[in-house]
Image: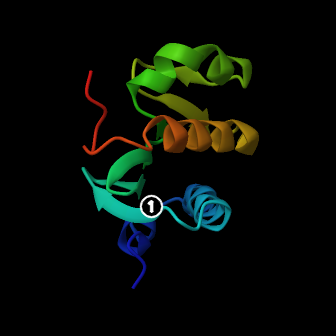
Amino acid sequence: MDEFEDFLLNIEDESHRKRMADIINWVSFTFPNLKKRFAWKQPMFTDHGTFIIGFSVANKHISVAPEEKWMNLFVSKAEGSGYTHGTRMFRIGFDQEVDYDLLKEIIEFNIEDKKDCDTFWRKK
């Protein structure tokens, strides 16, 4: 059974479920070395045991959590794609296109930046 199957099946709105599945499948295909992990009620991807990116679903959007460092450095890129944000995440509205180039940049940044990280979260 896929690590995220139960999570996806519990998304009631079929179009929201499909959007989340599309994103998860894209990450899995684009970054096959990342490991899937379900924790804190959300699907996430890790590299050598360290957090790379996580997702969650709300009524009107998908939250993307790239970890606070990326948000601090590059929040303008999320804004440039038309996404709203909090301090540790940004939101892709279900009425918005998914900026896969932005997701790719986030994941590549975190993989490189955390290549020597030996903890799940970055140490401050």
Front residue of this view, candidates 110 and 59? 110
Quarter residue 91 falls in: top right
For mark 1, what is the residue?
11
Tell whether 124 sits left or right of 111.
left
> Which residue does the image show at 34% across and 41% down from the upper left?
117
- Please say if 53 is above or below 32: above
Tell whether 5 sits left or right of 18.
left
Name the residue at the front extreme: 116
Q: Amino acid at mark 1?
A: Ile
Front residue of this view, candidates 25 and 82? 25
Q: Position of residue 120 (x, y in %)?
A: 27, 45
Q: Position of residue 30 (x, y in %)?
A: 67, 61
CA neighbours of label 1 inside 10 A, class few (<14), some (14 to 19), many (20+): some
**On the rendered image, what quadrant is the N terminus found in?**
bottom left
Q: Position of residue 76 (x, y in %)?
A: 64, 14
- Please say if 86 is above or below 19: above
Secondary structure of the residue carrying tag 1 is loop
Can residue 61 be seen in this snapshot?
A: no
> Which residue does the image show at 27% across and 45% down from the upper left?
118
Can residue 104 be seen in this snapshot?
A: yes
**On the rendered image, what quadrant is the C terminus found in?**
top left
> Which residue does the image show at 49% across and 61% down from the upper left?
34
